[in-house]
Image: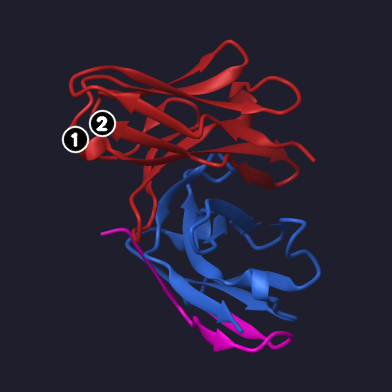
Chain colours: A blue, B red
Amino acid sequence: QVQLVESGGGVVQPGRSLRLSCAASGFTFSYYPMHWVRQAPGKGLEWVAVISYDGANRYYADSVKGRFTISRDSSKNTLNLQMNSLRVEDTAVYFCARDSSRYYTGMDVWGQGTTVTVS
Amino acid sequence: QTVVTQEPSFSVSPGGTVTLTCGLSSGSVSTSHYPSWYQQTPGQAPRTLMYSTNTRSSGVPDRFSGSILGNRAALTITGAQADDESGYYCVLYMGSGIWVFGGGTKVTVL
């Protein structure tokens, strides 16, 4: 079945880096744009970044622009998020999500999330 | 910076109907914003209910429906059930690859 599994979360000090991964299975990974969405403790959902189906285009929320880099490896069906210069306010559960079509029409499949704590 | 607005909370009786809305601090929501709706209970991943305004996600019962009402996107729940008690989030596409979530609506069924 269609599945997304995040990994790589943990506890990290402010200013340090962390790399999250999302393993996709059960669908043609290279067909869909992929998103990262986060949720700080007790807060709502916040969109973080999206990468186009072919990796050619990447877009970021202002809160992470210049610090985070989204990438994908279609040979491994893997989505990544490289997080540099981490801040306390980046503490959140990070979800990867698939877009519902090739051209940005909304997220439809979600992973279970991985927790990042910056402290 | 455009803010996506949702009602903070709503109460509905079992079997009743409730319409949640998703608006913009400036301007109107249209289908070009591809409004999408997610249900989330604490500690769980979001569950997709609707994307691209009114496309129901796989397995979502037809008592959930999406639409544009006036200048806002809307999610209507008909025949509310106890397990509909949850948080509901909308997200809108702002163009240039950018998406923005609303603050969420907490729905109570009582």
Tell whether label 2 touches label 1 (CB within 8 Å).
Answer: yes
Disc 2 is placed on an element classified as: strand
* Residue positioned 70% across, 71% down in the render: A69
- Residue with the mark numbered 2: B109
Amino acid bearing label 1: Ala
Mark 1 Cα within 10 Å, few/some/many (few <14, many 20+)? few
Q: Nearer the viewer, residue A44 or B38?
A: A44
List x then y, in percent, for residue A31: 51, 54
Q: Position of residue A17 (x, y in %)?
A: 67, 86
Task: Residue type at mark 2: give it.
Answer: Val
Horizontal and vertical percent position of residue B64: 31, 26
Chain ID, mark 1? B
Q: Which residue is located at x 66 percent, y 75 percent?
A: A88
Residue position for label 1: B82
**Magenta segment: does it hold B30?**
no
Q: Is residue A31 visible?
A: yes
Image quadrant where one finds the C terminus of chain A: bottom right
Vertical placement of residue B13 versus A97, above or below = above
Q: Magenta stretch?
A: A1-20
